[in-house]
Image: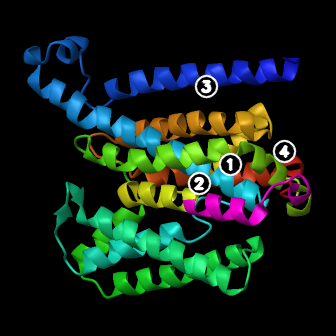
């Protein structure tokens, strides 16, 4: 094992330890401090115990899963498009999910299926519709061109965004506010149902990306070189497209569109550990989960007892990061300018 590999393994170990610390400490932080006795002996503090086990633990789990899923999706899209500014929402999945949620709110629907809320089902349906439209438009050009896929995603995203604005404009004040609040993103969950609903998408999507790290490394060098090295580029792009899009759809359906996570985290990890996806994927998963969990901690404590939508926190961090990325020395290494 060479020095570079040892250095990367040490960084991964540090990220793993950091993730364990954050996951252990985040549920303890909030407007109400939960004593250890209330956790170990629920009878001694019923309210604090319920807050810890029914609200904070599920919320930390959902934030870690959501952050990891959005971050690794952004990393995969950046490799697939060879574009450092690609995000999990590039292909219009978030717009499709947001449109589904907006229509659900506008129609005043109230239902749940197998414990899954109606707004999450509607959002995921919208995400699936977006995925199918982008795939259909890309295949209509007789191939699976990355450029065609990107343009189709942008077109679908803009179209759905305009329909969302129209839906919001035609809604009354109450419905309009609910739509706007959902579009800000949030991690308000009670119980583990949402965790169990999201986990299959994140785990399966992450497993597929981890399995295809070799292909991602070769695709970063160009499709021609990847093909010459034995990679079935068309098949690889199709698998990555569906795996990442479904994962993003599963996350957005529950958390709403939380921006900038999928752009910032891969860049930070790439600066720390390099561009080798064998190590970068694991680092992105860990750091993405830690990042969104810390952002959620800020969101629920900065103006307690009120709460800031976590999407606002990530956007406030993402704007300056984007400017730093453009103006900093690392921009040329990333291929941004």
Is 204 a magenta residue? no
Residue that mark 1 sits on: 321
Tell me whether the residue at label 3 lies in contact with that at label 2, contact meaning CB atoms closer than 8 angstroms.
no
Is 227 a magenta residue? yes
Q: Nearer the viewer, mark 1 or mark 2?
A: 2
Left or right for 80, reference 287: right
Tell me whether the residue at label 1 lies in contact with that at label 2, contact meaning CB atoms closer than 8 angstroms.
yes
Give the class, few, some or many, for how many residues have Cα within 10 Å of label 3's Cα (few <14, many ≥20).
some
Tell me residue 138's x, y (percent).
Answer: 66, 79
Nearer-the-camera pick, 101 or 34? 101
Q: Earlier in the sequence, mark 4 or mark 2?
A: 2
Residue that mark 3 sits on: 15
Distance of label 3 from label 2 (alpha carbons):
20 Å
Residue that mark 4 sits on: 330
Left or right for 97, reference 159: left
Residue 252 appears in view: yes
Q: Earlier in the sequence, mark 3 or mark 4?
A: 3
Give the class, few, some or many, for how many residues have Cα within 10 Å of label 2's Cα (few <14, many ≥20).
many
Q: Nearer the viewer, mark 1 or mark 4?
A: 4
Callout 1: helix, strand or loop? Answer: helix
Which SS type dominates the magenta stretch? helix
The residue sitting at 26% across, 74% down in the picture is 105
Quadrant occupied by the C terminus: bottom right
The residue sitting at 47% across, 25% down in the picture is 22
Nearer-the-camera pick, 218 or 83? 218
């Amino acid at each position: 094992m060479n020095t570079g590999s040892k250095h990367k393994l040490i960084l991964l170990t540090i990220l793993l330890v950091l993730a364990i610390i954050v996951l252990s400490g985040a549920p303890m932080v909030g407007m109400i401090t939960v004593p250890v006795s209330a956790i170990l002996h629920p009878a001694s503090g019923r309210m604090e115990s319920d807050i810890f086990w029914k609200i904070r633990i599920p919320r930390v789990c959902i934030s870690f899963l959501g952050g990891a899923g959005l971050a690794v999706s952004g990393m995969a899209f950046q490799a697939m498009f060879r574009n450092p500014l690609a995000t999990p929402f590039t292909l219009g999945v978030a717009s499709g999910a947001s449109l589904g949620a907006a229509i659900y709110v506008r129609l005043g629907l109230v239902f749940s299926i197998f414990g899954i809320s109606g707004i999450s089902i509607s959002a995921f349906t919208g995400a699936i519709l977006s995925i199918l439209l982008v795939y259909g438009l890309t295949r209509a050009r007789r191939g699976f061109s990355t450029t065609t896929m990107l343009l189709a995603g942008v077109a679908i995203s803009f179209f759905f965004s305009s329909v969302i604005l129209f839906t919001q404009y035609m809604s009354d004040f109450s419905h309009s506010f609910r739509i706007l609040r959902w579009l800000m993103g949030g991690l308000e969950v009670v119980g583990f149902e949402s965790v169990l609903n999201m986990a299959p998408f994140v785990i399966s999507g992450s497993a597929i990306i981890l399995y295809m790290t070799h292909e991602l490394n070769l695709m970063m060098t160009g499709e021609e070189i990847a093909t010459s090295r034995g990679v079935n580029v068309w098949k690889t792009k199709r698998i990555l497209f569906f795996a990442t899009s479904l994962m993003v759809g599963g996350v957005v359906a529950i958390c709403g569109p939380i921006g900038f996570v999928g752009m910032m985290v891969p860049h930070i990890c790439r600066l720390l550990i390099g561009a080798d996806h064998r190590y970068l994927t694991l680092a992105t998963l860990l750091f993405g989960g830690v990042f969104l969990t810390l952002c959620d901690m800020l969101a629920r404590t900065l103006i307690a007892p009120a709460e800031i939508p976590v999407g606002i926190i990530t956007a406030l961090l993402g704007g300056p990061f984007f400017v730093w990325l453009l103006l900093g020395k690392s921009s040329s290494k990333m291929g941004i300018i």
